Amino acid sequence: MSNSSSGTGTSSKPRAASSQPSETSSKRKRGVFQKELQHMMYGFGDDPNPLPESVALMEDIAVEYVTELVHKAQDIGSQRGKLSVEDFLYLIRKDLSKLNRCTELLSMNEVLKQARKVFESEEFD
């Protein structure tokens, strides 16, 4: 029963969902995010060792989401002639929790960059 319901959900997309994963998988190396996705799935309540098919499906969904997000950001950035972080933040602004998490991660990235600069400059002194 779960197989038919999951198949129905993907087939209702405007694009041909059945051809999309095969096109994507032929262009990229599959399984790159396998360990990370297994840990994330476990963190969200799945089995510590989820089925390989489930992990592959999650990878396909995640890669498709990120690819679409990048294409939309490129469309926004092309109006100005360059792609920026703000283009991505603009796209996810509707989901406040994602926006807050992104800004938190960007802020932490800046803190880490500054710490690395200080550490590297102290090494050469």
Image (cartoon, rainbow, N blue to C red):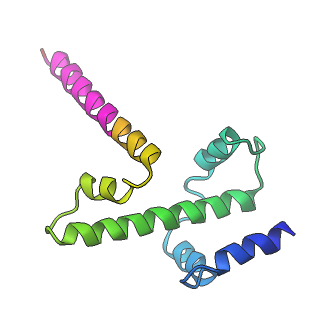
Task: Please state if 54 lies on the left or on the right of 83 as rendered.
Answer: right
- Looking at the image, which is closer to me, 121 or 21? 21
- Left or right of 39, for residue 122: left
On the question of residue 30 being in view, the answer is no
Residue 98 visible in the picture: yes
Judge left or right: residue 92 versus residue 44: left
Residue drawn at the location 59% of the way across and 79% of the way down: 13
82 and 33: which is toward the camera: 82
- Image quadrant for the N terminus? bottom right
Q: Is residue 47 magenta?
A: no
Does the magenta run of residues contain 112?
Answer: yes
Where residue 44 appears, as percent x and y from the top left, is: 67, 42
Quarter-of-image position of residue 90: bottom left
Query: Is 29 above or below relative to 124?
Result: below
How far from the left and from the top, in percent, is residue 86? 25, 53
Q: Main secondary structure of the magenta part?
A: helix
First to last magenta residue range: 106-124
* Residue 109 place in picture, x, y as percent: 31, 35
Give the residue drawn at x 70%, y 41%: 42
Near-viewer residue (122 or 49): 49
Count of picture labels: 0
Residue 13 vs 123, above or below: the answer is: below
Please give the name of the residue rendered at 82% of the width and 66% of the height, measured from the top-left corner.
2
Quadrant in which the C terminus is drawn? top left
